[in-house]
Amino acid sequence: MAEYARIIIDISLEKLDRPFTYRVPEELEGKVRIGDQVQVPFGKGNRKLTGFVIGLAAESGLSKDIPIKELEGVLPSGSITGQLIDLARFMRQQYGGTMNQALKTVLPMKTPAKEKQVQYVELTLDRSRAQELRTQWEKRHAVAKVRLLDALLAEGELPFTVITTKLNVSSTVIRGFEKEGYVAIRSERTYRNPMEFDKGNDYRPTLNEEQSRAVEGMYENFEHSPKRPCLLHGVTGSGKTEVYMELISRVLKKDRQVILLIPEIALTYQTMMRFYHRFGKRVSVLHSRLSAGERFDQLERARRGEIDIIIGPRSALFAPFERLGLIIIDEEHEGTYKSEDKIPRYHARETAIYRAAQMNGMVVLGSATPSLESFYKAQTGEYAYFSLQNRYQGRALPTVSVVDLREELKAGNRSMFSRTLKEQIQDKLRKKQQIMLFLNRRGFTGAMSCRSCGTAFKCPNCDVSLTLHKDGKLKCHYCGYEIPKPKLCPVCGSKYIGGFSAGTQKVEDGLMKEFPEARVLRMDADTTRKKESYEDILSRFANGEADILVGTQMIVKGHDFPNVTLVGILAADMSLIEDDFRGAERTFQLLTQAAGRAGRGEHPGNVVIQTYQPEHYAIQTAAKQDYAGFFEEEIGFRKLLHYPPAGHLLLVLMKAEKEEDMEALAQDMKQATETMGQKHPVVIIGPADARIRKLNSIYRKTLYIKARNYDELVAIKNEIEKYREESGYPYGSVSFDFDPIHGE
Ligand code: ADP
Ligand code: ZN
Ligand code: ZN
């Protein structure tokens, strides 16, 4: 009996976005499974392409005179995969794009296993000589050197070999050791999991009352109504991770598996070790340092049921667990849970909820500053709500001062450090405590405001900040509204109008001038080009090698620094006047999270927030760590303008190679959507130039569609796709982003 396979060809062209039927040759019968990657001849020239099997049938369903080609080979991905294919279908429907793009996002990719070089460090001294050196270095406070020796000696037996990534010591220190002849560094091709722990110690701390209540509540929800997601709202340092671990161990006892999503930037060595120590080799971490082959190996282990917990960033969501019972999304408010550069532009939150429901599992969303979306759903009762209101062991939240930069300017202080911040820095330096200075800058935003009165220039239609473009105009990139750049502030008449251009380098220079005795470390995109150096810098700071760490939002997450007692936020306005509707939310989150870094050890903490708009509710409420107060204000604004979560927003991104095609495409889409809009209660905004008007010599424009219900937007998206297909995809291309986080 012949067998036929329905195959999605691995080419992301809208035109080819449908299944093709192939005959399974005799020698492969019974060997082809749904989800496998196969090789097929395609098109007139029978080009060899790969595709995904999405269905198998005994009949081709096609008329006899249509010739059917045979597929030529299987690359068994062996994934579970009926469910993952169904998930891909859901994502394609919810977020747009082709089925092939959705499948590629969801299915584990078989890549030829290129083995990565693994570096080992080997001590070349004998133990007594090593001990001698250790004593000398300790006297000289060479902390990093001592730590490296200890790590090597702790290995017990000669030749004291350790994999470099396991050391938590900067590569500079290690290379220095090599030069001095203390160690040899060697590389091996074979991959060994650097974190193989046989058995976790299953150590459980005693949870406090709040923590226990959260665990009990969520576990009960897991047993009785798993379809209902839980929101765990716990202030920074309240012990959310401990709560997760306890809940995980209970779910494991039910023989179910767990996926824990953590933003890449928070997935530090410290965090990994907490899980390895407790759960041993039942855990696998999909961090970005794994090669494609290693990653595939880990996913294969997951499929075979050799592991029960997968920890990783967004894409770990697709781990092929057969007994999945729980998906936890830590720091659920983070923008990185939304895929923005790759299609489909899915959000991990909704996708996780769909995936968990497939297996009757549960989703837990955790954050100190929940997204407006999640808190809104907790209020309506769609999510179950649990809170941890106190820091573990009752450590006090830090004391926050808000500094008005307009007053500094009036007092003649033009430095980027206010008088209050300078005093505080001085004080902490004297006490030998540590300081973090934080610049919440994200790429280029050309947003401007008045330095004298704080006025930000906003679009009268959309209430988002206007941004300065090359032609000297201030523009709204939602609706296209524009005005010439004002020379004087329309409110106070001041001529101090500007953007924020300070970078971390400038902050570092400023510190050197004002505090020449301070040891400063800087962390931003420049200093962290290499993956390793990010952890390097954090571990050097944790190790006391600097007094002040300067950085962008990168430094907000991750390590616990018990000796940090001052956090300074240099320009809170930078995110406040971002040109999209999430500016205030992002500001509140950044300030609250940054403040949460201070005073985690035995000494109480201080936070200084510098701003031109001290009266803004995002700043006022963040200073008081008042989430509920912030939510009330912000949801009012969202409701007024029907922004998510009070309404929904579909971004239609249009691209074309020629400028006239771009214009034509934008007009065509505007007309088409307006016609569609007559049947659906939606508002169409734009078209406008995208933030980046031309990228890789391709023009870009946006159209925003607003609706009360998400489903209306999905319906419009489907109609646009149909319209594009029927009209033969003229001018250029179109893609979608639902409830965008950053927009285009
Ligand atoms: P969060 O994830 O909410 O920021 P963590 O789970 O990292 O908080 O906890 C903060 C610190 O408090 C950690 O060092 C953690 O080990 C400790 N901690 C939290 N809960 C407990 C507990 N019940 N027993 C012992 N230590 C705890
Ligand atoms: Zn002004
Ligand atoms: Zn506008």
Image (tube, helix red, strand yellow):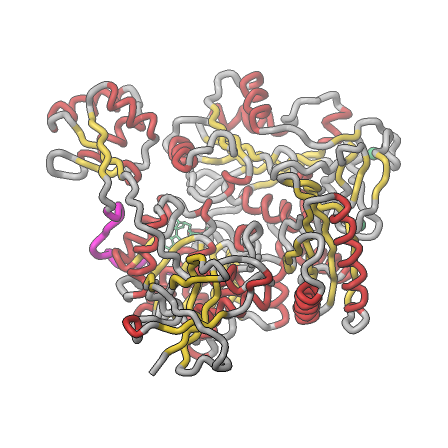
Q: Where residue 176 sits in the image (x, y, percent)?
A: 29, 22
Query: Can see residue 134?
Result: yes
Up/down of 543 relative to 331, above or below: above
Q: Would residue 597 be found to the left or right of residue 619 on screen? A: left
Q: Which residue: 42% across, 42% down?
A: 560
Q: Would residue 213 be found to the left or right of residue 642 on screen? A: left
Up/down of 542 relative to 411, above or below: below
Q: In the image shown, does 713 or 209 lie closer to the viewer?
A: 713
Q: Where residue 162 sits in the image (x, y, percent)?
A: 22, 37
Asked if the magenta segment contains residue 686, the reply would be no
Q: Quadrant of the N terminus?
A: bottom left
Q: Which residue: 48% across, 24% down?
A: 520
Q: Which residue: 43% across, 74% down?
A: 55
Residue 28, image quadrant: bottom left
Name the residue at the front extreme. Answer: 65
Q: Would residue 364 be found to the left or right of residue 344 on screen? A: left
Q: In the image shown, does 383 or 470 lie closer to the viewer?
A: 470
Up/down of 525 relative to 691, above or below: above
**How many numbered marks does the figure carry?**
0
Q: Where residue 413 sits in the image (x, y, percent)?
A: 71, 22
> What span is colored magenta in the figure?
192-208
Q: Would residue 236 be found to the left or right of residue 572 on screen? A: left
Q: In the image shown, does 124 or 93 lie closer to the viewer?
A: 93
Query: Can see residue 83?
Result: no
Q: In the image shown, does 564 or 65 lie closer to the viewer?
A: 65
Q: Which residue: 39% across, 59% down?
A: 108
Residue 422, image quadrant: top right
Q: Where residue 295 sits in the image (x, y, percent)?
A: 35, 52
